[in-house]
Image: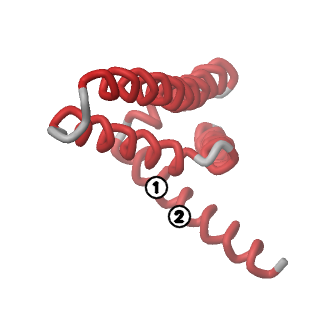
């Protein structure tokens, strides 16, 4: 039964991650960090402009980081909810065998999803 729960968890997690476009959120976060770093070390930009840009980048960075954190919290919440209904899913997730199974299930699910999406 825990293996079925693992499959359910993987499918839900992948669908959540693809629906909210987590990779683009992470790329945006990294891009904002690069912009902030360049801004700090730039000698060509005045301090008043630096202040304005830092505030703007910081707001964007906060929002993007909150989105990423909320997605992670949602997936952790799903894990704990599944743990209440399916016995031994949490120990399976934390074991080496569970990590290997989850990786294999993830690869299979993504491959099947891409195959069927290509057919449409």
Whether residue 50 appears in this view of the structure is: yes
Q: Position of residue 98 (x, y in %)?
A: 44, 44
**118 to 70, vertically: above or below:** below
Q: Is residue 16 left or right of residue 92?
A: right
Whether residue 88 appears in this view of the structure is: no
Along the line of sight, the residue nearer the viewer: 24 or 120:
24
Please tell me which residue is depicted at 39% across the width and 39% down the height of the picture.
32
**113 to 11, vertically: above or below:** below
Query: How far, Cα to Cα, is label 1 from label 2?
Result: 6 Å
Instruction: Give residue 60's mark.
Output: none
Along the line of sight, the residue nearer the viewer: 118 or 63:
63
**106 to 52, vertically: above or below:** below
> Callout 2: 10 Å neighbours few (<14), some, many (20+)?
few
Q: Position of residue 23 (x, y in %)?
A: 51, 50
Locate residue 54: give its quadrant. top left
Please tell me which residue is depicted at 24% across the width and 24% down the height of the picture.
47
Quadrant including the N terminus? top right
Q: Position of residue 83 (x, y in %)?
A: 60, 23
Mark 1 lies on residue: 103
Q: Position of residue 19 (x, y in %)?
A: 69, 47
Along the line of sight, the residue nearer the viewer: 106 or 73:
73
Locate residue 95: give its quadrant. top left
In the displayed image of the protein, which residue is found farthest to the right? 120
Q: Is residue 7 left or right of residue 90?
A: right
Disc 1 + disc 2, Cβ < 8 Å: yes
Please tell me which residue is depicted at 20% across the width and 41% down the height of the picture.
44
Q: Is residue 88 left or right of residue 1?
A: left
Q: Is residue 78 left or right of residue 100?
A: right
Instruction: Give residue 107's mark.
Output: 2
Quadrant including the C terminus? bottom right
């Amino acid at each position: 039964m825990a293996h079925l729960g693992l499959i359910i968890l993987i499918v839900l997690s992948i669908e959540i991650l693809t629906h909210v476009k987590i990779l683009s959120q992470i790329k945006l976060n990294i891009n904002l960090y690069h912009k902030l770093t360049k801004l700090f070390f730039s000698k060509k930009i005045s301090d008043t402009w630096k202040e304005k840009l830092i505030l703007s980048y910081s707001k964007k960075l906060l929002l993007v980081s909150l989105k990423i954190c909320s997605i992670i919290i949602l997936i952790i919440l799903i894990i704990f909810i599944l743990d209440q209904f399916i016995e031994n899913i949490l120990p399976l997730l934390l074991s080496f065998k569970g990590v290997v199974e989850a990786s294999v299930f993830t690869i299979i699910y993504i491959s099947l999803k891409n195959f069927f999406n290509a057919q449409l």
